[in-house]
Image (cartoon, coloured by chain):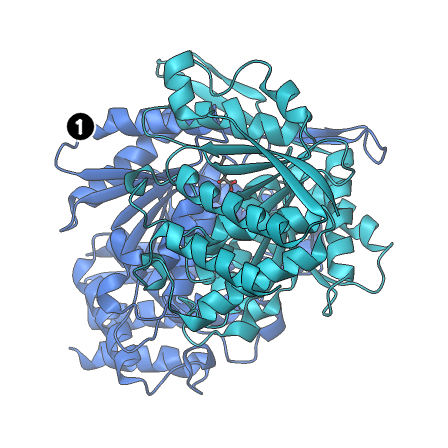
Chain colours: A cyan, B blue
Amino acid sequence: MGDYKIAVLPGDGIGIDVTAEAVKVLKAVAALDGGINFEFQEFPWGSQYYLAHGEMMPKDAIDTLAGFNSILLGAVGDPTVPDHVTLWGMLLPIRQRFQQYVNLRPSKLLPGIESPLRGKGVKDIDIVFVRENMEGEYSSVGGRMHQGTAAEVALQTGVFTRYGTERIIRYAFEVAQKRPKKHLTSVTKSNACCFSMVFWDEVFKEVGKDYPDVLTDQYLVDAMAASLILHPEKFDVVVASNMFGDILTDIGSAIMGSMGLGASANIEPTFKYPSMFEPIHGSAPDIMGMGIANPLAAIGSAKMLLEHHGEHNMAELVSKAIEQQVAEQKVLTPDLGGTAKTWEVGDDIVRRILASC
Amino acid sequence: MGDYKIAVLPGDGIGIDVTAEAVKVLKAVAALDGGINFEFQEFPWGSQYYLAHGEMMPKDAIDTLAGFNSILLGAVGDPTVPDHVTLWGMLLPIRQRFQQYVNLRPSKLLPGIESPLRGKGVKDIDIVFVRENMEGEYSSVGGRMHQGTAAEVALQTGVFTRYGTERIIRYAFEVAQKRPKKHLTSVTKSNACCFSMVFWDEVFKEVGKDYPDVLTDQYLVDAMAASLILHPEKFDVVVASNMFGDILTDIGSAIMGSMGLGASANIEPTFKYPSMFEPIHGSAPDIMGMGIANPLAAIGSAKMLLEHHGEHNMAELVSKAIEQQVAEQKVLTPDLGGTAKTWEVGDDIVRRILASC
Ligand SMILES: CC(C)[C@H](C(=O)O)[C@@H](O)C(=O)O
Ligand SMILES: CC(C)[C@H](C(=O)O)[C@@H](O)C(=O)O
């Protein structure tokens, strides 16, 4: 129960379309539960802002956002702006400055949806990915020498600290411990990356000693990618580095049946800074504004915002609304075989939420 | 037509089981075609050798192997030896010292095999992966500081040279140009890796100017992983860095229906040094010697050896034998739903080859 100041960053492309629906849903939640108040403030940052101002967001953006309890993000990325600018100019600084070191990404097949994996059903796909979100392969350490000549070399250094590695692994053990299967899989590539990943494996073993009730195993990232396709039922909670987590969670979204379903939370667990909630999918500028983007990933992310703030009843309500809508198969966007518009999906979720009082 | 000295390195686990079948098949080819002679020499290097001698292969192993025309490798990796030792002690030095900078990995769904991807058939999965095989993320540049303390940090540097990047991209364009669709997809993560991958993208654009008839596109690695599951039919030839190629080709094997089918070639295109042919799958020590390992990936790799040496008719014959065997569905290992033993599959391929004279 509380008052929450939410910064809304629709960003680019369909980020704008789907974020509107997530806000709609949170407003419905507040309408239903008198104890919850949201104060939304929207910021027009992103690629359009960059084209006009030469930066993805203003210099004081981080200070501004620090005054909020949480951030709702759509997506960033636009063909007119180099990818590394959209990212290092907005998404990554927010994740890093606010110590959002946990990227939580559930991959769960919903009843009513066919997975692209032949013969795999609802009971086979129920995985929570815990992705390191602040360091590792996503570092700005590196550079280029002899640029433009035949002798050119580009270096990119992954940075793995004990501080960063230990806390994400510990967080993942905590998540695993609360699930019925209590099973945690760590994914590395220690055969090839003999410094960073060997180190990760050591920390995984050490931290694991504090969680004797959690069953663990370790996979190489290539075998893991294949296993998520062939045997997703083998996994419960998965912890991985920033890059591997990025790749594996897109696989996680795909096996849920649509990229339009993957929700995610960028979490700073101590509440010192705002956390950020965003769909896993990108900005898909080619379909922007056409009303065909699936808002369920964004709405699912709004649900994770409620959970983060301890509003478990309301989070549960949103979950149920999504599940019922999908199971009934009536109001679905084209990615799920339906003809509904983005806003019709949002409206239908709102209707279900309001109907549950 | 020629005489070939082949070094046989069965390695560990099922590598031993499947390599025996690949050798059998090459012997059948030589029996059929009077113009082809193979001289095989086997080396017992790998994890067992390491446990006995403290090294995966003798110090002069590279010099020894240099005297061969090609290398047939099974698999390396064993639970009793740290992964980075098995790799950096054998597989990676061979790839690197012999300038095998191309890792060619076809992913093609064979008639008779069901892909794990619902609704995807033979016409949807026919991809050739061209993986950079000598540099990039697989580098031994890096280290660890403050080991064992709270301040510890591990650094791992990916090294991308213009020399290495340009030649693999050029090779991929050549491969694409010879295929009917003439379509090449480059996979990077330029939003996160702002030095290495941005550099790769630049080189890709530059080299592409020399191949105006090849259609190109670029994917981010996370979106690519998902797309291989959702829309494999979108791809023809795919070029990627060492690490991304590693991950994507395991996905490529998985969507072919079994890890037991993915063949690969580590190619040094100038014939200055031997090239190496190996299945994509690992050593699976848990099923070693049980006769259930599928030898088709190893046999497919032997087929790639024939192609590399210009023995196209014989390569074609092996291809046909594999295709017919799989289509008939009679002699298949358990991974493909059959009950045949590893050697029965090999014998059956041999029978088909000899029957075609
Ligand atoms: C846009 C991109 C940098 C980002 C990432 O890799 O973290 C996205 O793919 C994600 O998964 O949130
Ligand atoms: C064993 C391992 C180092 C190797 C690699 O990553 O190159 C393997 O996965 C492969 O794909 O050949």
Q: Position of residue A316 (x, y in %)?
A: 64, 61
Q: Position of residue A102 (x, y in %)?
A: 67, 42
Where's the C terminus of chain A, which quadrant? bottom right
| Left or right of residue A217, residue A224 in this image | left
| Residue type at the position of mark 1 | Asp
* Residue occupying the point 46% across, 30% down: B191
| Foreground pick, A40 / B243 | A40
Q: How many numbered dots are placed on residues in this image?
A: 1
For disc 1, the chain is B
Task: Kindly indicate the quadrant of the structure image that contains residue A326.
Answer: bottom left
Whether residue B278 appears in this view of the structure is no
Name above or below for residue B312 compared with residue A305: below
* Residue occupying the point 56% across, 59% down: A354
Q: Which residue is mark 1?
A: B210
Q: Position of residue B109 (x, y in %)?
A: 30, 67
| Left or right of residue A233, residue A268 in this image | right
Name above or below for residue A142 compared with residue A208: above
Task: Kindly indicate the quadrant of the structure image that contains residue B238.
Answer: top left
Whether residue A215 appears in this view of the structure is yes
Q: Position of residue B298 (x, y in %)?
A: 40, 65
* Residue occupying the point 76% across, 54% down: A173
Q: Is mark 1 within 8 Å of ligand 2?
A: no
Q: Secondary structure at mark 1?
A: loop
